Image (cartoon, grey):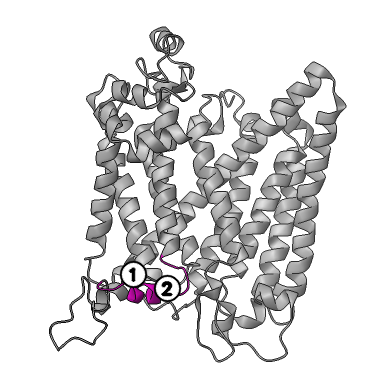
Amino acid sequence: MGCIIGTGLAGAACCCGSAACSLCCAACPSCKNSTASRIGYSLMLLFGSIVAVIMLIPGIRSKLDDIPGLCSGIFDGKAPPGMDVSVFQKEQCDHAVGFLAVYRVCFAMAMFFLLFCVLMIKVNSSKDPRSKIQNGFWFFKVLIMIGICIGAFFIPGGTFGEVWMVVGMIGAFLFILIQLILLVDFAHGWAESWVELYEETEAKCYYIGLFFFTILFYLISIVAIVLFYVYYASGDCALHKFFVSFNLILIVGMSVVAILPRIQEHQPRSGLLQSSIISAYVIYLTWSAMSNNPDTKCNPNLKDIIDPPTHNITTAATVGGDANGTGTSDGVFDWQSILALAIWLFAVLYSSIRTSSNSQVGKLTLSEKTILQTDTGSSDSEGDAETGQKVWDNEEEAVAYSYSFYHFMLFLAALYVMMTLTNWFKPSSDMTTLNANMASVWVKIVSSWLSILLYVWTLVAPAILSGRDFG
């Protein structure tokens, strides 16, 4: 990991090509070029997201004023008129924090990855000159992203926030579905690995482990559903009652389908562990959707559930406001957002590391040509690794993943983290303006239904289309 940070983000010595990169990585374990590059791009996305998080820290705007000469005059107004100057005007500093600033930072990341998505179309092997850009020149790529970010802050306010919020919702919706595919792949890989270990070693700990985690995920789902009925779907909250009840029915049906004899015949290692993980994910999406409902009676604050207040709470309080209806930044980093970011981080890193051509990730990111190739690369590349080259080229014959689609996935990931950090609210530089909206509710709940549909399709497709290879 330290190798990638040094070479991928700040290593000017690595911007000249793989030879220089191998020198930078001399103290690191050997790794494939394809894996190193993906982790490098993932870290660029991660560090950009950290910058966006910093812009939402409560009190960060006042800290900027404390820096002499930055947002306020060097002499703090004590100099004669016109003599006390600052680097930035007050309005410019106001735009550097808040939800709209997050939109601008994530806009820069999204445009960077979209640019590379277009640039890397039809790259089939490392012999293509564009692969050198994909796997090298990291210093300049970081400068490009920083340049786009600086330029984003000069975009006039106007309708930028409203338009980019719609784009963000669409992109975040698509990334939720990609997260589901990655989660299904993880669940299948986990179950198959432990089943194989159990068959090879006959150690019962693997069998007990599968049983334990299956029960654990189902218990989490059941407890969450009960809590939903108590706190989110009580009284006049008919829409939430429908969401919870309908998803409960879908989860039960999905679990039954997973263990049907016909399904087991075509997928003998498909079981309840995968279904339990998907069930927990769907329950999370349901909670996330209900948490964006502007109706305070159906969307209690988590703090209020744990410690019920003794006075009425207004709509603003449910999204991080006080009892007087004035929004604050308390709602920015709630548990729902933290969990969402954890799943997002898992999905991004998992897609960077998981490269097996017979996995769902492989089928998601590989072209038809690369699926026929193993991930080990050519014998020459293996020779490079054996002779001491730390980052070796495993894509001389064919790329290990679709460069273009991988960048498109990171483009969607940038939009998803933007919507998550802003709690899917309407953007504003003024952090006291937090407006929940029903559009985000429907985006998330529909994504939960499509998640179940996609998972069920992975179960029934081999049985229905028996002539196709789904291995």
Q: Secondary structure at mark 1?
A: helix
Asked whether 128 or 260 is in front, the reply is 128
Q: Residue, x 30% and y 27% (percent of image)?
A: 123
- Residue 254 marker: none
Pointer 2 with pointer 1, Cβ within 8 A: yes
Hey, what amino acid is under mark 2? Lys
Q: CA distance from mark 2 to mark 1?
A: 8 Å
Instruction: Tell me where residue 452 appears, x and y as whole percent.
Output: 63, 49
Q: Is residue 457 above or below residue 69?
A: above
Q: Is residue 183 above or below residue 382?
A: below
Was residue 65 drawn as part of the magenta stretch in this picture?
yes
Q: Which residue is mark 2?
A: 426
Q: Which residue is mark 1?
A: 161
Instruction: Tell me where residue 384 appears, x and y as whole percent.
Output: 40, 11
Q: Residues within 10 Å of mark 2 (few under 14, many from 20)?
A: some
Q: Is residue 301 visible?
A: yes
Instruction: Tell me where residue 298 appears, x and y as whole percent.
Output: 66, 78
Please report the bounds of the magenta region as a residue range: 55-69
Q: Residue, x 66% and y 66% (percent of image)?
A: 243
| Residue 227 falls left or right of residue 292 | right
Was residue 377 drawn as part of the magenta stretch in this picture?
no
**Outermost residue toward the left?**
82
**Which quarter of the rendering shows the C terminus?**
top right
Instruction: Tell me where residue 229 appears, x and y as whole percent.
Output: 76, 70
Q: Earlier in the sequence, mark 2 or mark 1?
A: 1
| Residue 273 falls left or right of residue 140 | right
Q: Secondary structure at mark 2?
A: loop
Q: Residue, x 74% and y 22% (percent of image)?
A: 196
Hey, what amino acid is under mark 1? Gly
Location of residue 50 by image quarter:
bottom left
Location of residue 121 by image quarter:
top left
Q: Residues within 10 Å of mark 1 (few under 14, many from 20)?
A: many
